[in-house]
Amino acid sequence: MNPVYKRVVIKISGEALAGEKRTGFDFELVSAVCAVVKKAADAGVQVGIVIGGGNFWRGVKDGAGKVERVSADRMGMLATCMNCLAVCDVFRQLGAKARVMTAVDIQGVGERYDTRKALEYMENGEIVLFAGGTGAPFFSTDTAAVLRAAEIHADAILLAKNVDGVYSADPRKDPEAVRFDSISYDEVLARRLQVMDSTATSLAMDNSIPVVVFALAEPENILRVLDGEHIGTLVK
């Protein structure tokens, strides 16, 4: 393996980790993903991970107007902590060095996020899972992933989703939707494409962090991207 990216943040959709179940965990898939990420770390890639919470709770959407926005978002933060704890344990069972750092103080879940500490751990070969989003409501885990990537000076963000790239429309609803090989941040924002939310896209653009969007269904895609193979969609 000859990685083209030396330090990355991998953003994993919580729903993607649920597989066909759409809720909870598909541990066969989780184990496969963790095994691939361990290979990358063993090859010298410094890896930070942000996991969404959609396999348990999707904030305002699941609140259905009954849960106030701030509370709904904080519930989503807790869902990301649950995901990070589970994935961290799978890493450890595979023999990987991994730890959870949280954006909010939750005793027993992980240590409070600190940029310098995170870099120290990653430089020592540990996989760091960033839990709790940004620690503030009104910001998605997409934004958290870009924020952490900017803070640790990541070379790229690997956006592992249920779809295999960025399309001109939702491919599940529009059979005429076309997948882009590459696309600019400006075009993503102008066309309101659902890559990440607009805050995350703007933050990536302002900090010139490339985003590679690909399907998690084939976990080996992570290694392919790190090796420089062109799969999915590159947003830059």
Image (spheres, helix red, strand yellow):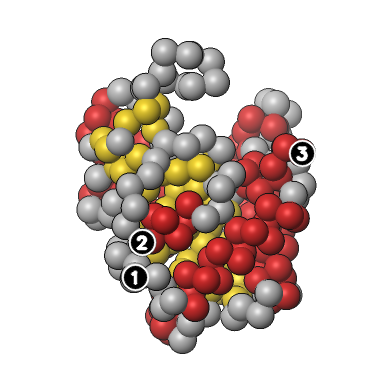
| Amino acid type at mark 3 | Lys
Distance between the Cα atoms at labels 3 and 1? 35 Å
Label 2: which secondary element: loop
Q: Position of residue 90 (x, y in %)?
A: 71, 68
Q: Which residue is mark 2?
A: 227
Q: Indicate the position of residue 70 as horizontal and vertical percent values.
A: 60, 43
Query: Can you name the residue that lies furthest to the front here?
Result: 1
Q: Quadrant of residue 232?
A: top left
Foreground label between 3 and 1: 1
Whole-number angstrom distance, CA of label 2 to CA of label 3:
31 Å
> In which quadrant of the rendered image does the C terminus lie?
top left
Residue at x 23% of width, y 53% of height: 208
Q: Quadrant of the N terminus?
A: bottom left
Q: Which mark is residue 2?
A: 1
Q: Residue at x 33, y 47 (%)?
A: 230
Of callouts 2 and 3, which one flags the residue occurring earlier in the amino acid sequence?
3
Q: Position of residue 192 (x, y in %)?
A: 35, 25
Q: Secondary structure at mark 3?
A: helix
- The residue type indicated by label 2 comes to Asp
- Compare marks 3 and 1 and give the one earlier in the sequence: 1
| Quarter of image, res 182 | top left
Rendered image quadrant of residue 106 = bottom right
Residue 27, can we see it? Answer: yes
Q: Is residue 127 above or below residue 175?
A: below
Q: Observer-nearest residue: 44 or 99?
A: 44
CA separation, marks 2 and 1? 6 Å
Element assignment for label 1: loop
Tag 1: amino acid: Asn
Residue placed at 38% from the left, 61% from the top? 226
Task: Name which of mark 2 and mark 1 comes first in the sequence.
Answer: 1
Is the Cβ of the residue at disc 2 closer than 8 Å to that at disc 1? Answer: yes
Q: Is residue 107 left or right of residue 215?
A: right
